[in-house]
Image (tube, grey):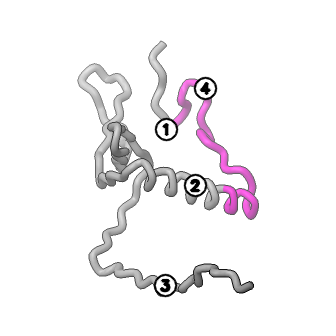
Amino acid sequence: MAENTPQQQQVQLRIDESKMHTTYSNTIRTSTTPDEVVLDFGMNMPVPSPENQPAMLFSVGSRVVMNWAGIKRLAINLGQVVRQYEERNGEIQLNRGQNAQGGPGGPRLAQ
């Protein structure tokens, strides 16, 4: 008896980078709705304040809006990329060079 199994076809993926823009981001802000996740990529930069208190400016450079299925695929992919990097190079240290209060170069929590 012959089995009826669907044959898998390979699809060639072509990537068009002609309209791509590359930017650097050192921080991300996320917002959600029941249907979408909004990712704002940008730069945290220290700025002077009138009271001479430390302040940060978040300058948004790019916004990406994705549906929940797309964001889950992104999360899985990023998890795999980080795992592969750490297997080759060791664990990525978050807040490197900062103490518990934010330390040099980082924002400080209000006391």
Range covered by the magenta-colored residues: 83-105
Q: Return the mark for residue 105.
A: 1
Q: x%, y% of residue 89?
A: 73, 60
What type is the residue that disc 1 sits on? Gly
Residue 36 left/right relative to 87 = left
Q: CA distance from mark 1 to mark 3?
A: 47 Å
Q: CA distance from mark 2 to mark 4?
A: 30 Å
Say what secondary structure mark 1 lies in: loop
The tag earlier along the polypeptide, 3 or 2, is 3
Label 3 packing within 10 angstroms: few (<14), some (14-19), many (20+): few
Foreground label between 2 and 4:
2
The tag earlier along the polypeptide, 2 or 4, is 2
The residue located at (48%, 22%) in the rendering is 109
Q: x%, y% of residue 4?
A: 63, 81
The residue tagged 2 is 76
The tag earlier along the polypeptide, 1 or 3, is 3
Classify 103 as above or below 75: above
Q: Quadrant of residue 82?
A: bottom right
The residue located at (71%, 86%) in the rendering is 2
CB atoms of marks 1 and 4 within 8 Å: no
What type is the residue that disc 3 sits on? Val
Q: x%, y% of residue 46?
A: 36, 38
Q: Quadrant of residue 59?
A: top left
Classify 83 as above or below 7: above
Q: Return the mark for residue 100.
A: 4
The residue tagged 3 is 11
Residue at the far left: name it: 50
The tag earlier along the polypeptide, 3 or 4, is 3
What type is the residue that disc 4 sits on? Ala
Foreground label between 1 and 4:
4
